[in-house]
Image (cartoon, rainbow, N blue to C red):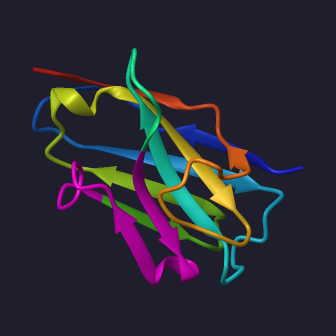
Amino acid sequence: QVQLVESGGGLVQAGGSLRLSCAASGLTFSTYTLGLGWFRQAPGKEREFVAASWKRGDSTLYSDSVKGRFSIFRDDPKKTMYLQMNLLKPEDTAVYYCAADPSRWGARLDYPYWGQGTQVTVSS
């Protein structure tokens, strides 16, 4: 059974930083084709893509809104994925979700496995 558990969310002032973690179980984390992604959903808005990693981190993809500020990386022995968020803005406020797909990656919303989400609130 695949489980993804996010942590690290919280309240931060604009310009600050947070690091989110996503601990995985039930997945072969070192699989070359394992796609990992971060998504977010703000109140009243649809879930949107934030960042994705593939080929054990050799390939990464970011949304234009976070490019240059956020970084996705992973620790395969720990089966954990991270999202380092710097220069946070109030518009980054959302529930952040991690997602996994054993064979694909990208900005799609149809990842088969999702975490429960962690709240990030950025005050102005």
The residue located at (22%, 59%) in the rendering is: 67
The residue located at (66%, 64%) in the rendering is: 79
In the displayed structure, 14 sits above or below 39; it is: above
Q: Position of residue 86 (x, y in %)?
A: 20, 49
Q: How many marks?
A: 0
Q: Which residues are magenta?
A: 49-70
> Left or right of 98: which side holds 16?
left
Q: Position of residue 55 (x, y in %)?
A: 56, 82
Residue 50 falls inside the magenta stretch: yes
Residue 103 falls inside the magenta stretch: no
> Left or right of 122: which side holds 19?
right
Q: Residue furthest top?
A: 44
Relative to the observer, which residue lies in front, 65 or 89? 65
Q: Quadrant of residue 70?
A: bottom left
In the displayed structure, 37 sits above or below 93; it is: below
Q: Position of residue 51 (x, y in %)?
A: 40, 57
Q: Residue furthest right?
A: 1
Relative to the observer, which residue lies in front, 115 or 47? 47
Can you say which quadrant of the picture contains the C terminus? top left
> Left or right of 102: which side holds 105?
left
In the displayed structure, 121 sits above or below 76; it is: above
The residue located at (90%, 50%) in the rendering is: 1
Q: Quadrant of residue 84?
A: bottom left
Relative to the observer, which residue lies in front, 67 or 56? 67
In the displayed structure, 119 sits above or below 27; it is: above
Q: Position of residue 18 (x, y in %)?
A: 30, 42
